[in-house]
Image (tube, rainbow, N blue to C red):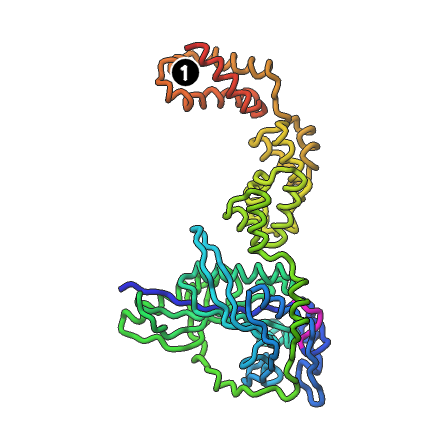
Amino acid sequence: MEWEVVIGLEVHVQLATQSKIFSGASTAFGADPNTQACAVDLAMPGTLPVPNEEAFRFAVMFGLAMNAEIGKRSVFERKNYFYPDLPKGYQTTQLEQPIVGEGQVEIHLEDGSSKTVRLHHAHLEEDAGKSLHDAVFDTGHGMSGIDLNRAGTPLIEIVSEPDMRSAAEAVAYLKKIHSIVTYLGISDGDMSQGSLRCDANVSVRLKGEEELGTRAEIKNLNSFRFIEKAIKVEAQRQIDLIEDGGKVVQETRLYDADKNETRSMRSKEVANDYRYFPCPDLLPVVLSDEYVEQVRGDLPELPDAKCARFEKEYGLSAYDADQLTQERPTANYFEQVAAKSGEAKLAANWVMGELAALLNREEKSIEQSPVNAEHLAGLIARIKDGTISSKIAKQVFEAMANGDGDADAVIEAKGLKQVSDTGAIEKLVDDVIAASTAQVDNYRNADPDKRPKMMGFFVGQIMKASKGQANPQMINKILKEKLDALL
């Protein structure tokens, strides 16, 4: 039997407002527990929520970026359930009339293919608090505690259609959402701090079937790697269960990264379980066409548009342009290097190659790069003008990363300037030819089409003799002339 995996994602994005969605309490991350939850966040008697206009503007920005319908009239409901980190006993959210309606986004996969994923809707809501398990308090004993600092932080929950058919597609979709919200500046997208979290609805069905299988929801996935692994292991669990004669039940599950498995958390609730009803404290929010168009006019250049521009303006391949525009800081860094060096393709290669490898090794973001854009542009300029070879450039780059100064300072201090003097290179070539009589005889007696490969031995010896500083182009030209003269 051939199975097909069906995936839909619910992505929760914390909005980067300074205050909460219905109160003036701070949303800053990292404060001491329960120091940023005010009476409104706790629904104390006599308090009333006041909507945060910035949260609505951010939600509209997202909807426009997703080519989605904008709900000109949106309504808040109360979603009723009891949980320790939900101080009100309900969550203020949107159900019937969300602020963002149907939309779509195109994702790009590693094999070069692309796919459109439909957006069902996105709605505004308030975040809950956070349960801290096995925390050590003043008593010195481990126990569970509740931090309500996060309670009331504005969220948009982005609900996709079940259009994804693999874990790779789900990760590509989530990365695209991450890219869009960070480009817009409506969220920092920091998954380690909970700014972007994801629930994955996973089901399986036989290939060719139309009807969806019973789904399980995997809650609170907070890294691209965990999302991919959780979807794969859950899909395989369902396939094994069905093939063994069992049935998948609709439920909520948690992913255990240590054991690489999902485990049951609770039976899956449906809307009726939450007893939704319109929030009596909040009026419907009505947006004018003029307001929406004003927000549209303030949108920055988005990833797809920037990608297309990079292809056209810099002559980059679709793959390179896509890689460079996934994160706004990377795109900005590349453009600075390309502008200062005048070499877009070399700039792309270095940003995606040596720089990316360095940042991965040191677990740093590009904003923390030890080599700034100006210094990398200076290095590329020295490759371009022949001062150093590409091989030597890697040594210079490492020295720059270690804080030894810009490219010119490193080249001068370490004596790495490329040898381009014709006389000096001719002497190196002559010395290697004189010391390699057997190889010269082999070259002379070889078929003409095999000789270009045989030159590699001589080039290697010359580069070794010059300590890697001889100009490779000049070596190849002079060497070929001298070897051909011996035929």
Residue closer to the observer: 120 or 110: 120
Residue closer to the observer: 142 or 262: 262
Dividing the picture into quadrants, the one containing residue 438 is: top left
> Does residue 220 show up?
no
Q: Quadrant of the C terminus?
A: top left
All told, the count of numbered labels is: 1
Residue occupying image coordinates x 46% and y 82%: 270
- Image coordinates for residue 436, horizontal then vertical, percent: 44, 14
- Image coordinates for residue 164, horizontal then vertical, percent: 43, 64
> Does residue 162 show up?
yes
Residue closer to the observer: 91 or 38: 91
How busy is the neighbourhood of tag 1: few (under 14 within 10 Å), some, or many (20 plus)? some
Dividing the picture into quadrants, the one containing residue 246 is: bottom left
89 vs 14: above or below: below
> Start and end of the magenta stretch?
16-21
Residue occupying image coordinates x 63% and y 52%: 329
Dividing the picture into quadrants, the one containing residue 358 is: top right
191 vs 150: above or below: above
Image-based side of 448 in relation to 223, left or right? left
345 vs 485: above or below: below
Majority SS type along the magenta span: loop
Image-based side of 318 in relation to 261, left or right? right
- Image coordinates for residue 26, horizontal then vertical, percent: 71, 72
- Image coordinates for residue 324, horizontal then vertical, percent: 57, 49
Disc 1 is placed on an element classified as helix
Q: Quadrant of the N terminus?
A: bottom left
Disc 1 marks a residue whose amino acid type is: Gln
User: Is residue 227 in the magenta section?
Assistant: no
Q: Mark 1 sits on what residue?
A: 439
Among all residues in the image, which is located at the extreme right? 24
